[in-house]
Image (cartoon, grey):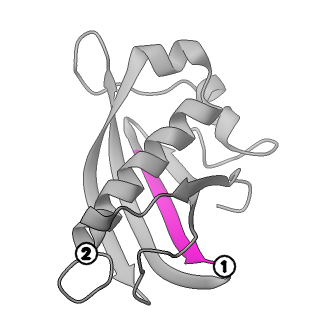
Amino acid sequence: MSNAIPHYVPIGIDPADIDFMGHVNNASYLKWVQEAVLDHWRALAPAEAVAQHLWVALKHEITYRKPTFLDDDVIATVLLEKVQGARAFYETIIKRGEEVLAEVKSSWCCIDASSLRPARLTREVIQHFFVGDEGEAGR
């Protein structure tokens, strides 16, 4: 992950995100991760690739560190760890200032927008997510 370009996404916390305990419900983190990863894709991938591909989440593993509250200023930092075939592996760190609120490992499947079948990304597209020549990006 050393050469991954970080992507920062401000998280808006809605009153509907707050549960009976007065902090953000765990389900909201899934929504935030999906929004952040898709924003990362749209921000860094070439427009043609964005138009030709969709993403489907395969797995999320969330480690909750601290509760999040309605008035918190929260940022999600998204990093593409690697791409293997049609799968992409992401790490998303959700923070309030320097405090880590949650760490999320997720895997996604790239889908061809026309056929709706799994699709591999080209090396040229993958390179948009890494600084310099990323050795593991094309594997």
Q: Position of residue 14 (x, y in %)?
A: 36, 61
Report the quarter where the N terminus lies: bottom right
In x, y percent, where is residue 130? 71, 44
Q: Residue at 71% x, 50% y: name it.
A: 5
List the residue tagged with mark 2: 25
Classified by dominant secondary structure, the portion drawn in magenta counts as strand
Residue sitting at 58 percent across and 16 percent down? 47
Q: Which residues are magenta?
A: 88-97
Amino acid identity at mark 2:
Asn
Question: Mark 2 and 1 residues: CB-CB less than 8 Å, in contact?
Answer: no
The residue lying at 64 percent from left, 34 percent from top is 44
Whether residue 117 is visible, yes or no, is yes
For the point 51% across and 71% down, the residue is 94
As helix, strand or loop, the secondary structure at mark 1 comes to loop
> Foreground residue, 133 or 79?
79
- Count residues near mark 1 (Cα–Cα under 10 Å), then give few for <14, some for 14-19, many for 20+: few
SS for dot 2: loop
Task: Between residue 6 and residue 87, name the one nearer to us.
Answer: 6
Amino acid of disc 1: Gly
Q: Position of residue 92 (x, y in %)?
A: 50, 63
Q: Residue furthest right?
A: 132
Quadrant of residue 124 within the rendered picture? top right
Which image quadrant is residue 70 in?
bottom left
Q: Which residue is mark 1?
A: 97
* Residue 100 against residue 131 in the figure, above or below: below
Given residues 76 and 91, the one toward you in this image is: 76
Q: Earlier in the sequence, mark 2 or mark 1?
A: 2
Q: Check residue 20 for magenta coloring.
A: no
Up-down relation of residue 129 to residue 8 (above or below)? above
Q: Position of residue 137 (x, y in %)?
A: 60, 43
Q: CA distance from mark 2 to mark 1?
A: 20 Å
Residue 139, visible in the rendered structure:
no
